[in-house]
Image: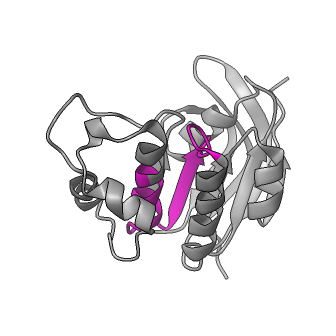
Amino acid sequence: MEPLLALDGLIAGWSQPVVGPVSLSLGAGDIVGLWGANGCGKSTLFAAVAGQARVFAGRVERAPGLTLAMQTQVPVRLAPLPVTGRELLGVAGADAAGLPPTLAAAAAQRLDRISGGQHQLLSIWAALAGAARLVLLDEPTNNLDPLHTALLGDLLAARRQDRAVLLVSHERAFLDAHCTRVLEIQPWC
């Protein structure tokens, strides 16, 4: 099977290199966790995959027509607007069918009236239930209590069959429990 994403000796950064070299390949069904110290370049690696950071060396190869969804460490919270969670899912092209009960209740409410954890999970659902075949999740466990962290693990497992997920977390136990493999990222030297 052809990979959805392949990184070959990637060195990336902004005005200068921050991370690399990194080589990895992801196919449908893969959930790959990125682990490393603060500042080692995990988020910069995401930005390079998304075409937002500078590639100094190596290659980023995406499958033809690959669609991508990316959630940053802090999901965008719109200014107080009368936008509901369900409307957010609609804008993201995400199917609301199958929302877990706790998310279904939050989806009916305005975004400015739900908790940070509810907003985090709705944003993750928007990425996983949309059309993207590659989903990048940067610190998806932020703002989540243990119950909702477990729910996140269930969402990842249920939505992985036709897509690949690349995620960053400082919670090594979460990565070990929910990823098909974990890659330790080293800063560029």
Residue at x 80%, y 27% (from the top left corner):
188
Looking at the image, which is closer to me, 25 or 43? 43
The residue stretch that appears in magenta? 122-145
Residue at x 38%, y 69% (from the top left corner):
131
- Specify whether residue 67 is in view: no
In percent of width and height, residue 9 lies at 77, 45
Disc tally is 0
Q: Quadrant of the N terminus?
A: bottom right
Looking at the image, which is closer to me, 132 or 73? 73
Q: Most extreme residue toward the bottom, as rendered?
A: 1
- When asked about the image quadrant of residue 103, the answer is bottom left
What colouring does the structure picture have?
Answer: one colour
* 132 magenta-colored: yes
* 108 magenta-colored: no
Query: Is residue 1 placed above or below 111 in the rendered structure?
Result: below
- When asked about the image quadrant of residue 10, the answer is top right
Q: Could you tell whether 61 is left or right of 177 in the image? A: left
Residue at x 65%, y 39% (from the top left corner):
45
Query: Is residue 21 placed above or below 103 in the rendered structure?
Result: above
Q: Could you tell whether 131 is left or right of 82 in the image? A: right
In percent of width and height, residue 5 lies at 62, 61
In percent of width and height, residue 21 lies at 80, 39
Q: Could you tell whether 150 is left or right of 132 in the image? A: right
Residue at x 38%, y 66% (from the top left corner):
130
Q: Most extreme residue toward the top, as rendered?
A: 15
Query: Is residue 20 placed above or below 154 in the rendered structure?
Result: above
Query: Is residue 12 placed above or below 67 in the rendered structure?
Result: above
- Specify whether residue 124 is in view: yes
Q: Quadrant of the C terminus?
A: top right
